Image: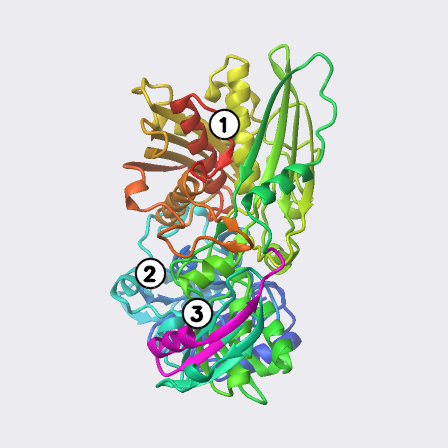
Amino acid sequence: MVYSLAATTLTVAAPIGCDSSTAEGAERADASARPGVLVTGDDEEMLVLEVTAANRVVVRLPRAEVGQGVTTAVAMMIAEELDARLADVDIPLSDARTRGNQFTGGSNSVGSLYGPARALAATARAKLVTAASRRWGLPARALWTKDTMVIAPDGRTATFGSLTEAAARITRPAVPTTPKPAARHKVIGKPTTRIDARDIITGKAQYAGDLNVAGAKPTVVARPPTIGGKIRAVDDRAARAMPGVRAVVRVAGGVAVVADTFHHAFKAKDALRITWAPGPLAALSDTAVRSRLRAAVPPLGAAPSGSTQVTGEFEFAFIGHSPMEVLTTVADVRADRAELWFSSQGPMFARDDIAAAVGLPASKVKVHVTRGGGSFGRRLNHDFALEAALVSKAARMPVKLMWSRSDDLRHGRMRPATHHRIRVSHKNGQVVAFTHALASANEGAVRDGARAQGGVTSALTRAGRGPSAGPVPSDSGLYNFGRLSGNWGSVELAAIPLGAWRSVDSGTTRTAEEIMVDETARSLGKDPVAFRRTTLRSKAVRAVLDKAASAGSWGRTMPAGHGQGIAVHEEYGSCVACLIEIDATDPKNPRVTRAVLAADVGIAVNPRGLEAQLMGATIDGISTVLQAGLHIDRGAIRESSFADFHYARQRHAPLRFEAHIMPSKGEPGGAGELGVPAAAGAVANAYARATGTKPRRFPLNF
């Protein structure tokens, strides 16, 4: 059953089958200050739906909105089952909770919320209809709902808001509470503009940097020139004497300046005289990193007797997350409590870690989750929020701490550099063995990020294995490639800040594998699409491959220096194919001219949002394969802004982009990270065909 209590507004709380005694704890107490009564259950989502007297439908979302459009998708689910106008649905973000699932990662938000959100709204609708039937003395089954109101056969109407008080007292609805079948969907599956689009483009949307928390002073940090560098001495007299400076405090990452404005803070930061001890990687540069990674790749072992080998080695550079909104936190830490505002993909872990760092019980720390201007996995880690909390505690005042773009690139998290060695063995026209060994920069630093990820590392990895498992022997690979095997090595790089980057390990492992699939097809004298069709295990993957190849006119005649490339990927319960066309007449400045993607993600709640995700994934593939990477130069990251971290700009985007969403009746799968490996692989394969080369180091201009 779904519990609700009498209140001034209808409040319905998930899940089905909860214990009312568990609803008497802190979650209910926290919500009692809001209109209505919060009642939570025991499942992971613990969603709560409120209908206010003003006819607003409110569901507080236990996920982060970082531009991926999850608030719109959930609003569509709620509107569908309630028969509410989408404009009447509000999806604010939940504060850090004490129980349940509040992770945003692994491309699982829509899939995990699809059932609970629809069940919640269906129950609320049943209660509202029952309340109207009692008011009018009519059979509940004679009434229907539309546009956030209940309608009677004689034309009478009642808004949900006018029924909410009565509906809150109903314990046994007179109509079924089961969600609609997909055949009756009118909102789910319809391309929909984001519910927050107008707020974003007009500047109304609030990010952490927009918040005006009483007394919170702008704060920046002077950081070491090398990764992991330490302070030897500080002369802060000039900085402290400057106008507008409120405090100068040491933190683990450097020296923080708190001032009246960010202008004052940056000026004072520049006035600090700091002597730095070099970090532990001060003697290390890219050449040495690549050499150590190459040496750490485990041996491939013996190839099958009598087989022909196709081999390749691939290098991938470090990649920064670089969300457009720089990392910002408002923190107010006092002797007996703390309150913070920042975008977090794991706010429950963040709260607990912050509490431990400032010496408070977790119950005395409140974390408000703000919208984020991009993430790509960066906000799975909360080092920037921990830093703000410690500065606030030391300065004894609220702070608004902002990392600069340079801070983010030179001291933020990044995708590990990797080295891959792949051998494909074929005999009598068939692949009989596929071996993939690789080495990665040690990922111990991303423990709290990796645990939020739900992806696999390789097409060869058994479903359900975690990212650290690596490409191991499996009987559930993407291709029928005979004996599948692999191994994983690592290189310790002390102090280097690593993090889960969009598509996690698949962004490199699957890119390398798709390049090798193309080269194997060439070795066998087969067309890359035809070869994939005969070796793919999944009908769904073959279907998206066929769609992309057909829509993209695979095999058409291309001018000299131009080429097509294709790649596929299957993960998160979804699959995608990407066809790329590239102009590489100037091999040092290639331009992707066309991208055609086909995806099967089960039921696509918002096809327009899915198209946007695939478009973003394509830009990621273009960037990381052709031009964007981070260099280590004597223990420091060389790049400091978008002027030298060459992520794709508008001029690098495809002139033509198409996304084809395959019809499906399956439960929604993941889409946020799905397209990156396929896009990256297709870009690399298109470049290879256009130039007649075998690309091995990425990005190509590194």
User: Which one is earlier in the sequence, the residue at label 2 or at label 3?
Assistant: 2
Contact between marks 1 and 2 (CB within 8 A): the answer is no
To which residue does mark 1 refer? Answer: 542
Q: Give, as a three-letter code, the residue at label 3.
A: Thr
Q: Is residue 175 visible?
A: no
Name the quarter where the C terminus is drawn. top left
Question: Which residue, as the protein is rendered here, is positioned at the far bottom?
Answer: 335
Callout 2: 10 Å neighbours few (<14), some, many (20+)?
Answer: some
Residue at 33 percent of width and 76 percent of height: 263
Q: CA distance from mark 1 to mark 3?
A: 40 Å
Mark 1 vs mark 3, foreground winner is: 3
Establish if 668 lies above or below 535.
below
To which residue does mark 3 refer? Answer: 370
Q: Give, as a three-letter code, the residue at label 1.
A: Arg
Q: Give, as a three-letter code, the residue at label 2.
A: Ile
Dot 2 falls on a residue whose secondary structure is loop
Residue 89 percent location from the top left of the image: 36, 66
User: Which one is earlier in the sequence, the residue at label 1 or at label 3?
Assistant: 3
User: Which one is earlier in the sequence, the residue at label 1 or at label 2?
Assistant: 2
Residue 231 percent location from the top left of the image: 57, 72
Residue 391 percent location from the top left of the image: 52, 79
Question: Which residue, as the protein is rendered here, is positioned at the far top?
Answer: 428
Dot 3 falls on a residue whose secondary structure is loop
Tell me which segment is drawn in magenta: 256-281
- The label shown at residue 195 is 2
Q: CA distance from mark 1 to mark 2?
A: 34 Å
